[in-house]
Amino acid sequence: MSRSKAIGTSAETAVVRALRTHGYPHAERRALAGVHDLGDITGTPGVCWEVKGGDAARTASDNQIADWMAETEKERANASADIGVLVIQRKGVGAANAHRWWAYTTSAVLAQLMEPSVALYDEAPIVPVRMLLADLTQVLRWAGYGEPLPEQLEVPA
């Protein structure tokens, strides 16, 4: 296995472990799908996950993040998923704490998750939004993805 592939495998495995403890018990690494990549993790219906690790992730520029976000969107479409999420390893945060790695989605996705009835305008800017993976999993679960949140964490209607 090449060094690059080993870094990717390690990062994906860390994210799967984090997802399993944050409401996605069926998360697992996805086998490679070639040209029509479907994302790195499966077992999370409606959500397509792209994972980046190693030095490239820890030192990624804004342009690199934008490129990876575009890649995530293509994979989301290929997988026919509702939501695409890019997870990036943070500098100084190891695999055991992958729940503290950065998770990126778009402002439009976050708005829809928080309030599904909100109509988004075509001219509204769609920009990347970054938060901790653990925080995004909570928002996703609140919106109906993954395992339900415990009652004490549910937001009243």
Image: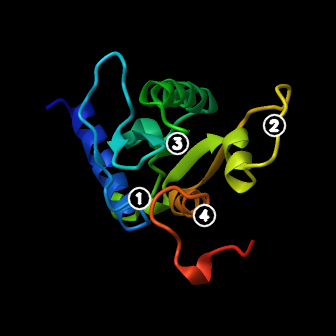
For mark 3, does the 10 Å Cα neighbourhood hold few (<14), some (14 to 19), or many (20 or more) residues? many
- Which residue is identified by label 2? 120
Judged from this view, the residue extending furthest toward the top is: 35
What's the CA distance linking mark 4 and mark 1? Answer: 20 Å
74 on left or right of 8: right
> x%, y% of residue 33?
28, 24
Which residue is rendered at x = 37% and y = 53% of the image?
15
- Which residue is identified by label 3? 85
What's the CA distance linking mark 2 and mark 4? Answer: 20 Å
Q: Which label sits in the foreground, 3 or 4?
A: 4
> x%, y% of residue 89?
44, 48
> x%, y% of residue 51?
41, 41
Q: Which label sits in the foreground, 3 or 1?
A: 3
Q: Which label sits in the foreground, 3 or 2?
A: 2
At numbered mark 4, what does the secondary structure look like: helix, strand or loop?
helix
Residue 97 quadrant: bottom left
Q: Amino acid at mark 2?
A: Leu
Mark 3 / mark 4, whichever is N-terminal: 3
Give the label on residue 98, or none.
1
What's the CA distance linking mark 3 and mark 4? Answer: 16 Å
Residue 99 quadrant: bottom left
